[in-house]
Amino acid sequence: MKKIKKVILLVSCLILVPTSIVFADVNAMEKSTMSVSDGEETISSFTITGYEFTYENAPEFAKDEYEKSCKELNIVPDKNHKIFIPDKVINMYNLDEYSGATRESFFIEFKKTYFLVTGSRSYRVDIAASSSIVGYNHTTSGNPVHLAQILCNQINGAGIKADGQFGTNTYNAVKSLQGRLGVTKDGIVGKSTWEAAGYAL
């Protein structure tokens, strides 16, 4: 009888050990998934392709626009700054074979409270954050501006370069986009414009 109890106890332990390991792996996997995605549903998404240049190697028309934006914002142009030009714009200038280009694509997802951008630079823009308000006297450079420029191109066919600098061309493109979206045409990308753009994709 003692031997039978030992065998039952041993078998029970062997059954429980693998079971607990499996549960541990499942929990770890769920936690890993949750850190990548908070479970918020994707409302809309798209991929945009084009060419990315450094300012130093960009075509003249892109350099000129970038310099103009920098001058408006009192920023010194950076030779390593990235300028993304969508395929539609590149095709207008016949620059498919331009030697200074790197082929890039960005995947943009709207998740109701934020945008997620994945590509050569990946970032998140929380639409309610004050640092995500794009426009004069607000955020005028960086990732939120880059995303606003991409959205102007995607939704409204603006044809502007996504250089991450908020200048006159971006301001005008934002106002035009706002008119199309039916929100206040103030040239400032705040929560209402972000939301309207996300749902319009």
Image: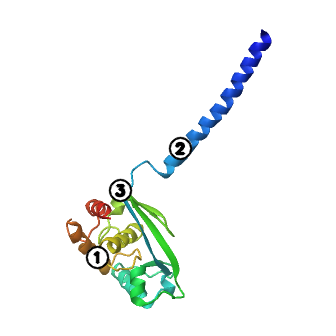
Answer yes or no: is residue 66 visible: no
What element does badge 2 sit on? helix
Where is residue 104? Give x, y as percent. 50, 74
Q: How far apart are marks 3 and 1 (CA)?
A: 24 Å
- Kindly identify the amino acid type of the residue bearing the numbered disc 2: Lys
Q: Residue at x 27, y 68 (%)?
A: 188
Q: Residue at x 31, y 77 (%)?
A: 157
The N terminus lies in quadrant: top right
Where is residue 197? Give x, y as percent. 30, 64
Could you tell me if the residues under marks 3 and 1 are in contact, i.e. CB atoms within 8 Å?
no
Q: How far apart are marks 1 and 2 (CA)?
A: 41 Å
Viewed as shown, does residue 179 lie left or right of 47? left
The residue that mark 1 highlights is 173
- Kindly identify the amino acid type of the residue bearing the numbered disc 3: Ile
Q: Residue at x 35, y 72 (%)?
A: 154
Q: Residue furthest right?
A: 3
The residue that mark 2 highlights is 31
Where is residue 183? Give x, y as percent. 21, 65
- Kindly identify the amino acid type of the residue bearing the numbered disc 1: Ala
- Mark 3 and mark 2 lie on one chain; the one further toward the N terminus is 2
The residue that mark 3 highlights is 43
Categorize mark 3 by other alpha carbons within 10 Å: few (<14), some (14-19), many (20+): some
What element does badge 3 sit on? loop
